[in-house]
Image (tube, rainbow, N blue to C red):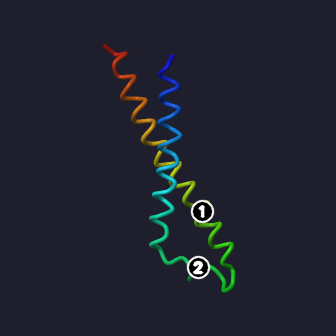
């Protein structure tokens, strides 16, 4: 079943791209007002974790849509 292998490669690539895009998008938000002064490491860790959460959610959504659309052919 090469279907699962292809979906795995697409999933890995999509996760990395979506996490990168989420990280890039979060750079445009001014988050330094939320954190205490001189807590740069905590702010950076928060942005990275938030980017992983957002990127994984978006890529999981896209992969679910892809998988469901591939399963539609089983109806006919």
Depth check, mark 1 against mark 2: the one in front is 1
> Does dot 2 land on a helix, a strand or a loop?
loop
Q: In which quarter of the image is the C terminus?
A: top left
Residue pictured at 48% horizontal, 59% vertical:
22
Q: In this view, does 73 lie above or below 67?
A: above
* Mark earlier in primary sequence (1, 2): 2
Label 2 packing within 10 angstroms: few (<14), some (14-19), many (20+): few
Residue 5 drawn at (x, y percent): 52, 26
Task: Write down the residue under mark 2.
Answer: 34
Residue 68 drawn at (x, y percent): 40, 29
Residue 6 drawn at (x, y percent): 48, 28
Q: Is residue 18 left or right of residue 41?
A: left
As measured in the structure, the alpha-carbon distance from the residue carrying label 1 to the one carrying label 2 is: 15 Å
Q: Is residue 67 above or below residue 32?
A: above
Residue pictured at 66% horizontal, 83% vertical:
36
Label 1 packing within 10 angstroms: few (<14), some (14-19), many (20+): some
Residue 61 drawn at (x, y percent): 45, 42
Q: Contact, CB < 8 Å: mark 1 with mark 2?
A: no
Task: Write down the residue under mark 1.
Answer: 48
Residue 62, label in figure: none
Residue pictured at 51% horizontal, 62% vertical:
23
Q: Is residue 29 above or below residue 38?
A: above
The furthest residue to the bottom: 37
The furthest residue to the left: 76
Residue 21 occupies quadrant: bottom left
Q: In this view, does 76 lie to the left or right of 20?
A: left
Total labels drawn = 2
Q: In this view, does 3 lie above or below 53?
A: above
Residue pictured at 47% horizontal, 36% vertical:
10
> Does dot 1 land on a helix, a strand or a loop?
helix
């Amino acid at each position: 079943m090469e279907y699962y292998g292809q979906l795995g490669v697409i999933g890995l690539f999509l996760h990395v791209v979506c996490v990168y895009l989420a990280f890039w998008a979060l750079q445009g938000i001014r988050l330094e007002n939320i954190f205490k002064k001189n807590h740069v490491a905590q702010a950076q860790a928060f942005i990275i974790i938030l980017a992983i959460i957002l990127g994984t959610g978006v890529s999981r959504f896209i992969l679910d849509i892809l998988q469901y659309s591939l399963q539609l052919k089983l109806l006919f």
